[in-house]
Amino acid sequence: MKTISEALATSGFETIDFIILIIYICLLIVLGLFLSRNKDGKEKTANDYFLAGNTLTWWAVGASLIAANISAEQFIGMSGTGFRDGIAIAAYEVMAALALVVIGKFLLPVMLDRKIFTIPQFLRERYNDGVGLAFSILWLFLYVFVNLTSVAWLGAIAIEQILGLQGMSVEILGFTISIRMLIILMLFIVAGVYSIYGGLASVAWTDVMQVTFLVGGGLITAYVALKEMGNVMGVNPLGALGRIYTDLTTGAHATDVHFHLVIQQSHNPEAFANVPGIAAVVGGVWLTNLGYWGFNQYIIQKGLAAKSVDEAKKGLIFAGFLKILIPFIVVLPGICAYYIAQDPQYFANMHLAGKINVADDAYPWLIRNFTPTGIKGLSFAALTAAIISSLASMFNSTSTLFTMDIYKKYVNKNANDRKLVNVGRIVSVVAALIALVAVKPLLGGLDQAFQYIQEYSGFIYPGIIIVFGLGLLWKRASSKAAIWTAILTIPMGVLFKVCLPDMPFQLRAGYIFIILLVFFVLVTYLDNKYVSTELPSEDDCRMMLRWAKILGGAGIIMIIAAAIVTISGALMPGADPDNNIIAYLNDIGFQAFFFFGVLVGQCAIWLYSNATDKVKDSKALAVNLNLFSTTRSYTYGSLGIGVITLLLYVILW
């Protein structure tokens, strides 16, 4: 059996690579502590610690959003899915960019206007204390037992794979401790040193540096892989990419899905189950993205800390453009690894070390074999940056949730800023200790932690979108409907999973959303707890009714089209998808338009109600429609994201 030093010596890493990594970590800690210092000897206020004193500029908001989002789940899990299923997994990233546009225009401005610290705080103000407390406890459990543990566990696995340390352990004071647990401990320490002391300001401003390493290192890894493959092929990196694309879309690979954003079920049923064709564009992926980017505390907290609504909006646009880069950073390397695996003899003279035993080995294998000395350290630093930045954001958001939603509300209502900041720091330390103890029992027996997390998300987001979204936008949304929808969300997910185990989770989440939405609307209209209210201005009413007709009509057309295609397809079993348009549409999951039609059409319900109903829920928000106005730069940025998305789907359909 190899020793640790022998494993490191054969990992392909040289001394300079480790020096680069150490310099990066030291620079990160020093910068984080420097940014967290108290200005002019003043004590940090709660707003300073938890929301960075609302000082974040657009570029800090955007960079911090991406740094909090990208972790080992993307570098390892998404690259592995790219190896197995292809570019279609990039739909999560591309559609997230569009979701950020929607959130920046319609959701975040309302929360900023209400001066929201936490998402449960909004629920408490909009519905009641019970709903807010329930979601506070739910998110705390999710952050500690799912998010912190999964990011640390997957990150440690990635580092083990890259350094060739799998399964190794060390003796410390008579105890045998695995290398993986030591890596997790070090990740927690590095992320905690500056985030726990300095709060969100340290997290957000260091994330600017982290994103530079993350994006730069990721792009360099992809470029070097293409360059080395191009050397064998006798072409430049761009030519290598073109060659890979041609070889994986023609001849014997004519039905290969690796370079198609929309997968046909008949071409690859397993890949379709993960990314179900057009459902990755108009299906339950919208629930995941709107829920994750709009109502997830450790993500949206960066937007809530912006210095103004305009800066927050521009930050989300910036994050949207960065999201579109992610497929080139993490998915393309996985496809390159797949291409090499198809004909390993062709690349035999490259003397590639190790094997890809499972799909998630793809990215670590590429780093070990393709990145030259020095660049290896940079690529490793990029991966480490992704893990540490996510952990730092989770520590901060965990402390924010407990301190502001539980401690200040129920334990010490008169706590001053100094007390709140100290409690927040203690909570972060406790969360790290609990996650460290729980990580192995929770995830040690899972072979596919990434897929498990995605499946779990699909259980909770349909209800979250309805409760939060309608609470923000519909004046009649009732507390009773919110409570019962929250209660039914997970049982509905379990029921559908048991009864329809083979249905892709994106489609399953869409159908659950439809059922819960109908339930929420019915309970709201049956609830007699409402108060009288005046109608909006005549101009506002006219605008809302006009959009209600447009969106309602669009939703009905989508639902009818989905019904026609689904029923017609059922009447012609055995039709060839490559020669029959109806069979083809069913083969790419056109039924997803049932969900998208309802998602678009439900806007007509609350727009019509807001314009015509003379009653509202007693805790309804007074929404100023001027909040939804956008600057020219936001409009141009949104159009840019839309055009790039359209071009990607036209080229890679």
Image: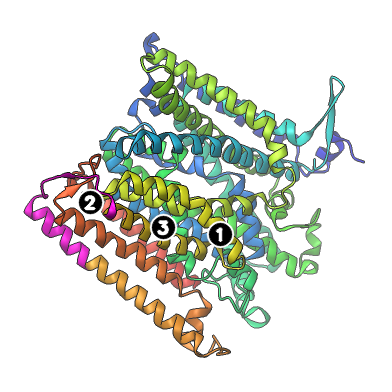
Q: Is residue 100 above or below residue 608?
A: above
What residue is shown with label 3?
A: 516
Crowding near the residue tagged with mark 2, few <14, some 14–19, many ≥20 C-alpha atoms within 10 Å: few
Task: Find residue 85 and report its image quarter.
Answer: bottom right
Q: Which mark is residue 181?
A: none
Residue beneath the point at 53% across and 56% down: 493
Residue at left offset 31%, top offset 50%: 470
223 magenta-colored: no
In the rendered image, is residue 514 in sight? yes
Question: Residue lying farthest top?
Answer: 41
Specify whether 421 is left or right of 375: left
Which residue corresponds to mark 1?
Answer: 495
Residue kind at label 3, given as amino acid type: Leu
Q: Which residues are magenta?
A: 526-549
Disc 2 marks which residue? 632
The mark nearer the N terminus, 2 or 1, is 1
Residue 196 is situated, as x and y percent measured from the top left of the image, at: 52, 23
Q: Position of residue 600 (x, y in %)?
A: 32, 63
